[in-house]
Image (spheres, grey):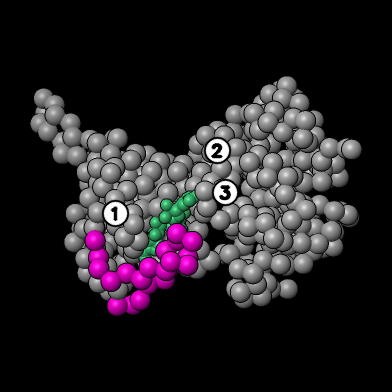
Amino acid sequence: MSKVRIGVLKEAPERKLTVLTPAGVERLKGKADVLVQRNAGGAAGFTKAAYEAAGAKLADTEEELLEGSDIILSYGHRDFRGSYNGQKTFIGIYNFLWEPHKVDLYLQPGINVHSLDLIPRTTLAQSMDVLSSIGSISGYQAVLLAAERSLATVPMITSAGGTLRPARFLIMGAGVAGLQAIATARRLGAVVKAYDVRKASKEEVESLGATFIEVEGATDDRNAGGYATTQTEEYMKRVHERLLEETAAADVIITTARIPGKKAPLLVTKEMVMGMKPGAVVVDLAAATGGNCAFTEPDQVVIKDEVTILGPTAIESSCGYSTSFLLSNNYVAFLEYLLKHQENLAQDPILSATLVVQDGKLVNERLMALKAPAN
Ligand code: NAD
């Protein structure tokens, strides 16, 4: 029986990573033939020679890659409408919950699509959890970005000229990215406080040596799969009052609060920014889904009253080698699982959760519940 043919697309230039490294190609040996678009890993530090040594073949163009693959891997979308026939499975991190109309790119007979941001947060699926990989790198990188932008040093420094006090970091949203931001800021010597709507995060925050800011009255949705849910207006008002004081004292704020498929909650209001210290920095990791700060502009540097607000939407690309390493392991784990369980696409808990399009039709219930895709 011929082996399945897996193709790896080169990402857009701003995304300096790949979802399958040469080590990933090695892991698939014996199970699949791998075709890699020329220079697909170049921006992340993986050479053509390394891919070839791992057993991959190279494709010169997207068309050649598409033609020679049954399963096509990428991070982002590519518009291939009308340029192929037959059975293809696309696997990516397509973020359809935020951009449901993008499903239209795949509504063609013979096409299956799995979006890995829909992987359930279960123990069985942990090795495939791309959002955790991206979150960890983003949280780490956000601290470095803030430290670089800040006018003051992060750790306490005692020197001949006097003593510099440690920077105060405030982390909002203590999920995967937030916890990694706390750990990184602590390693740099910052004094860290954190806030999350999920009470369950208190223990994790404290175990990293940060102070948890508690605001009573949050709505906890046990059916949200470990994620947060939209909060009442009254609760958000209480949060605002409590955080006014905390934001005024902070040198750096890193926000990571997101709600799957919804606009990110507004946590850092205009009033808060106006009350912050001159030279303070806000890094808003929710910029791609509306932002947690009132002044955030995606991928722009905004300066308001001498406070710098950054809204990077692909911060994980700034350490493309490490991000690719993690994502490649996630993709290989998913591919191995898919090849083993593909007869059971609609019933399997992991495959059915990630399956968005089957034979050219939208089949994902979470997506169907959102507004219908635009034509
Ligand atoms: P996320 O990226 O969706 O959100 C980031 C954080 O923002 C979350 O902690 C969320 O509670 C918080 N948030 C949302 N609205 C907020 C508001 N109004 N105010 C303050 N904070 C707000 O979440 P995530 O980082 O991907 O993780 C979500 C959960 O999933 C966590 O409990 C995490 O531990 C869990 N998780 C489980 C697994 C697994 O079991 N395999 C893997 C990864 C994450």
Q: Give residue 3's quadrant in the image.
A: top right
Q: Label 1 crowding class (10 Å Cα cut-off): few <14, some 14-19, many 20+?
A: some
Circle 3 or circle 1, nearest the eye: 3
The image shows residue 322 at horizontal and vertical percentages of: 52, 34
Q: Mark 3 CB in 8 Å range of ligand 1?
A: yes
Q: Amino acid at mark 1?
A: Lys
| Quadrant assignment for ligand 1 | bottom left
State the residue in front, 346 or 53.
Answer: 346
Answer with mark 3 or mark 1, whichever residue precedes in sequence: 3
State the CA–CA distance, disc 3 to disc 1. Answer: 25 Å
The image shows residue 270 at horizontal and vertical percentages of: 31, 67
State the residue in front, 263 or 30.
Answer: 30
Q: Label 3 crowding class (10 Å Cα cut-off): few <14, some 14-19, many 20+?
A: some
State the residue in front, 194 or 190.
Answer: 194
Q: Amino acid at mark 2?
A: Leu
Helix, strand or loop at disc 1?
A: helix
The image shows residue 240 at horizontal and vertical percentages of: 26, 68
Helix, strand or loop at disc 2?
A: helix
The image shows residue 184 at horizontal and vertical percentages of: 34, 39
Q: Mark 1 CB in 8 Å range of ligand 1?
A: no
219 in magenta: yes
**Disc 2 designates what residue?**
326
**Disc 1 designates what residue?**
202
Vertical side of 79 occupied by 182: above or below: above
Q: Which residues are magenta?
A: 214-234
